[in-house]
Image: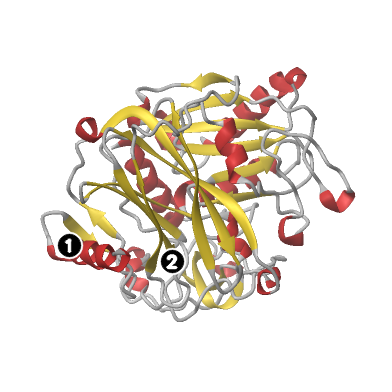
Amino acid sequence: MKKFYFVLFTLLFAILPACNKEVKTSGNGTFSYNFEGKVDFNANFTNERLRIEFILAGDASNQKAYLGTVSREPQWSGNPDSLIDPFGYGEYYFEAFEEGELVFSTGFCSLFSEWRTTEEASRVAKSMTHNVWMPFPKKPVKVVLYERRRADNVFQPMLEAVIDPADKLINTGRLNDFAVEPYMVNGDDASKVDLLFVAEGYTAAEMEKFRKDAARFAEYMFTLDPYKERRGDFNIRFLLSCSRDSGVDIPQDDVWKSTVCESNFYTFYIDRYLTIQDHSKIAEAVSGAPFDALFIVANCAKYGGGGIYNAYALGTSDNDRSDPVFIHEFGHSFAGLADEYFTSEVAYEDFYNLDLEPWEPNITTLKDFGSKWADMLPEGAVIPTEPNDSTQLGVLGVFEGGGYMAKGVYRPYFDCRMHHNNSEGFCPVCQRAIGRMIDFYTR
């Protein structure tokens, strides 16, 4: 039955031009698509939010998914006209069907998918949680979770479940009493990017410090293109999530704290990599708040952070590079941008399959460059761009090195915020990708 639905919906959106503006295959048969039709929000959903917890488990070779807690939460703040994902980004894909009709879809990444590319994953099996949010359905929905196969980039179904909104075991309990404080509200949540800053490692006595730290990040974001000219498209709020202890876990220094989200440095044994391994801790913290995107502010002076597409971004508050780290990590989580550096220490082993085109919009293996920024290059541009050095600053091209790999992966600019914290800003390719994501939430 799983294979039947997978093939059926792949063919359906490939053969119906009225509903299918552009099939995005990345040259490899991936079934993601741009959907031209509209889902009737009021007919299918309430204004509340459904949270579905998944447990992802496995190792480098295999993974499985299991259904966890299902919760009913307050306000769905997304755009009612943007219920079907047009990008096809992410290592996972989620769809919801009502009576056979697709009514919601989204792509995302998880820390677990990153861990599977580490050496440790070749020796041991682990599990991690991940949560997906969608509008609360009025009728039973069949939800399907897919994984992107590394061998061919094709999304393969890994879990199906039917969720009945009348099920008495759907959790409706209040998980916390954290206040949500508006910082900048430019209009109805349904037509804005609702960015929520979350306090991590701030005690009740440190909430004023959190407000100042979060405001600093927000104002810094609006100094850079394309955010600068799109300020009016954002609503920004602060979640006053109080922790028992001040600071975050730094395992390499034997520092352990009791915090709301249980963030920690030394992820994958990398000194600077700050993440939250239990995604459900974040979900519980934000369960009463409206949001489209999350940035978690860790009350710490150490350099580091992390960003996971359509999940969260995280950075420290008090390092002298905290502002550029914030905007870099938010580029990952909000717009699906890849890292463009290739010389820093990472735990991954051959993160990208060089025989396939990566899904991220700002890197390429040249296997399907036409789907990336080929349309932005001048006629007759030499590919790849030579020389690959600082004489090419400000030039849009195809520079070798990116995605943690010195060879075989190419980036659009010699230097961009996704490559280095000291660059002037985002390159035109990254700006376009960010702009398209803002449009998705607002138009």
| Residue under pointer 2 | 148
Q: Closest to the observer: 389 or 70?
A: 70
The number of numbered discs placed on residues in the rendered structure image is 2
Q: Looking at the rendering, which quadrant does residue 112 occupy? A: bottom right
Q: Secondary structure at mark 2?
A: strand
Q: Closest to the observer: 342 or 309?
A: 309
Labelled disc at residue 51: none
Q: Amino acid at mark 2?
A: Arg
Q: Is residue 199 left or right of residue 160?
A: right
Residue depicted at 75% across the width and 50% down the height:
265
Relative to 141, does residue 63 appear above or below in the rendering? below
Q: Amino acid at mark 1?
A: Leu
Residue depicted at 40% across the width and 23% down the height:
186
Mark 2 crowd level (few <14, some 14–19, many ≥20, 10 Å Cα):
some
Q: Quadrant of the N terminus?
A: bottom left
Q: Secondary structure at mark 1?
A: helix
Residue 260, x across and y down, in percent: 68, 33
Q: Closest to the observer: 222 or 212?
A: 212
Q: Is residue 23 left or right of residue 135?
A: left
Residue depicted at 72% across the width and 60% down the height:
268
Residue 422, x across and y down, in percent: 65, 52
Answer whether residue 415 is visible to the viewer in this image: no
| Residue under pointer 1 | 12
Answer whether residue 187 is visible to the viewer in this image: yes
Q: Quadrant of the C terminus?
A: top left
* In the image, farthest residue toward the front: 168
Tell me how far mark 2 sits from mark 1, CA to CA: 20 Å
- The answer to whether the residue labelled 2 contacts the one labelled 1, judged by CB atoms less than 8 Å apart, is no
Q: Is residue 139 left or right of residue 231?
A: left
Relative to 105, does residue 393 appear above or below in the rendering? below
Relative to 66, does residue 120 appear above or below in the rendering? below
Residue 228, x across and y down, in percent: 46, 36
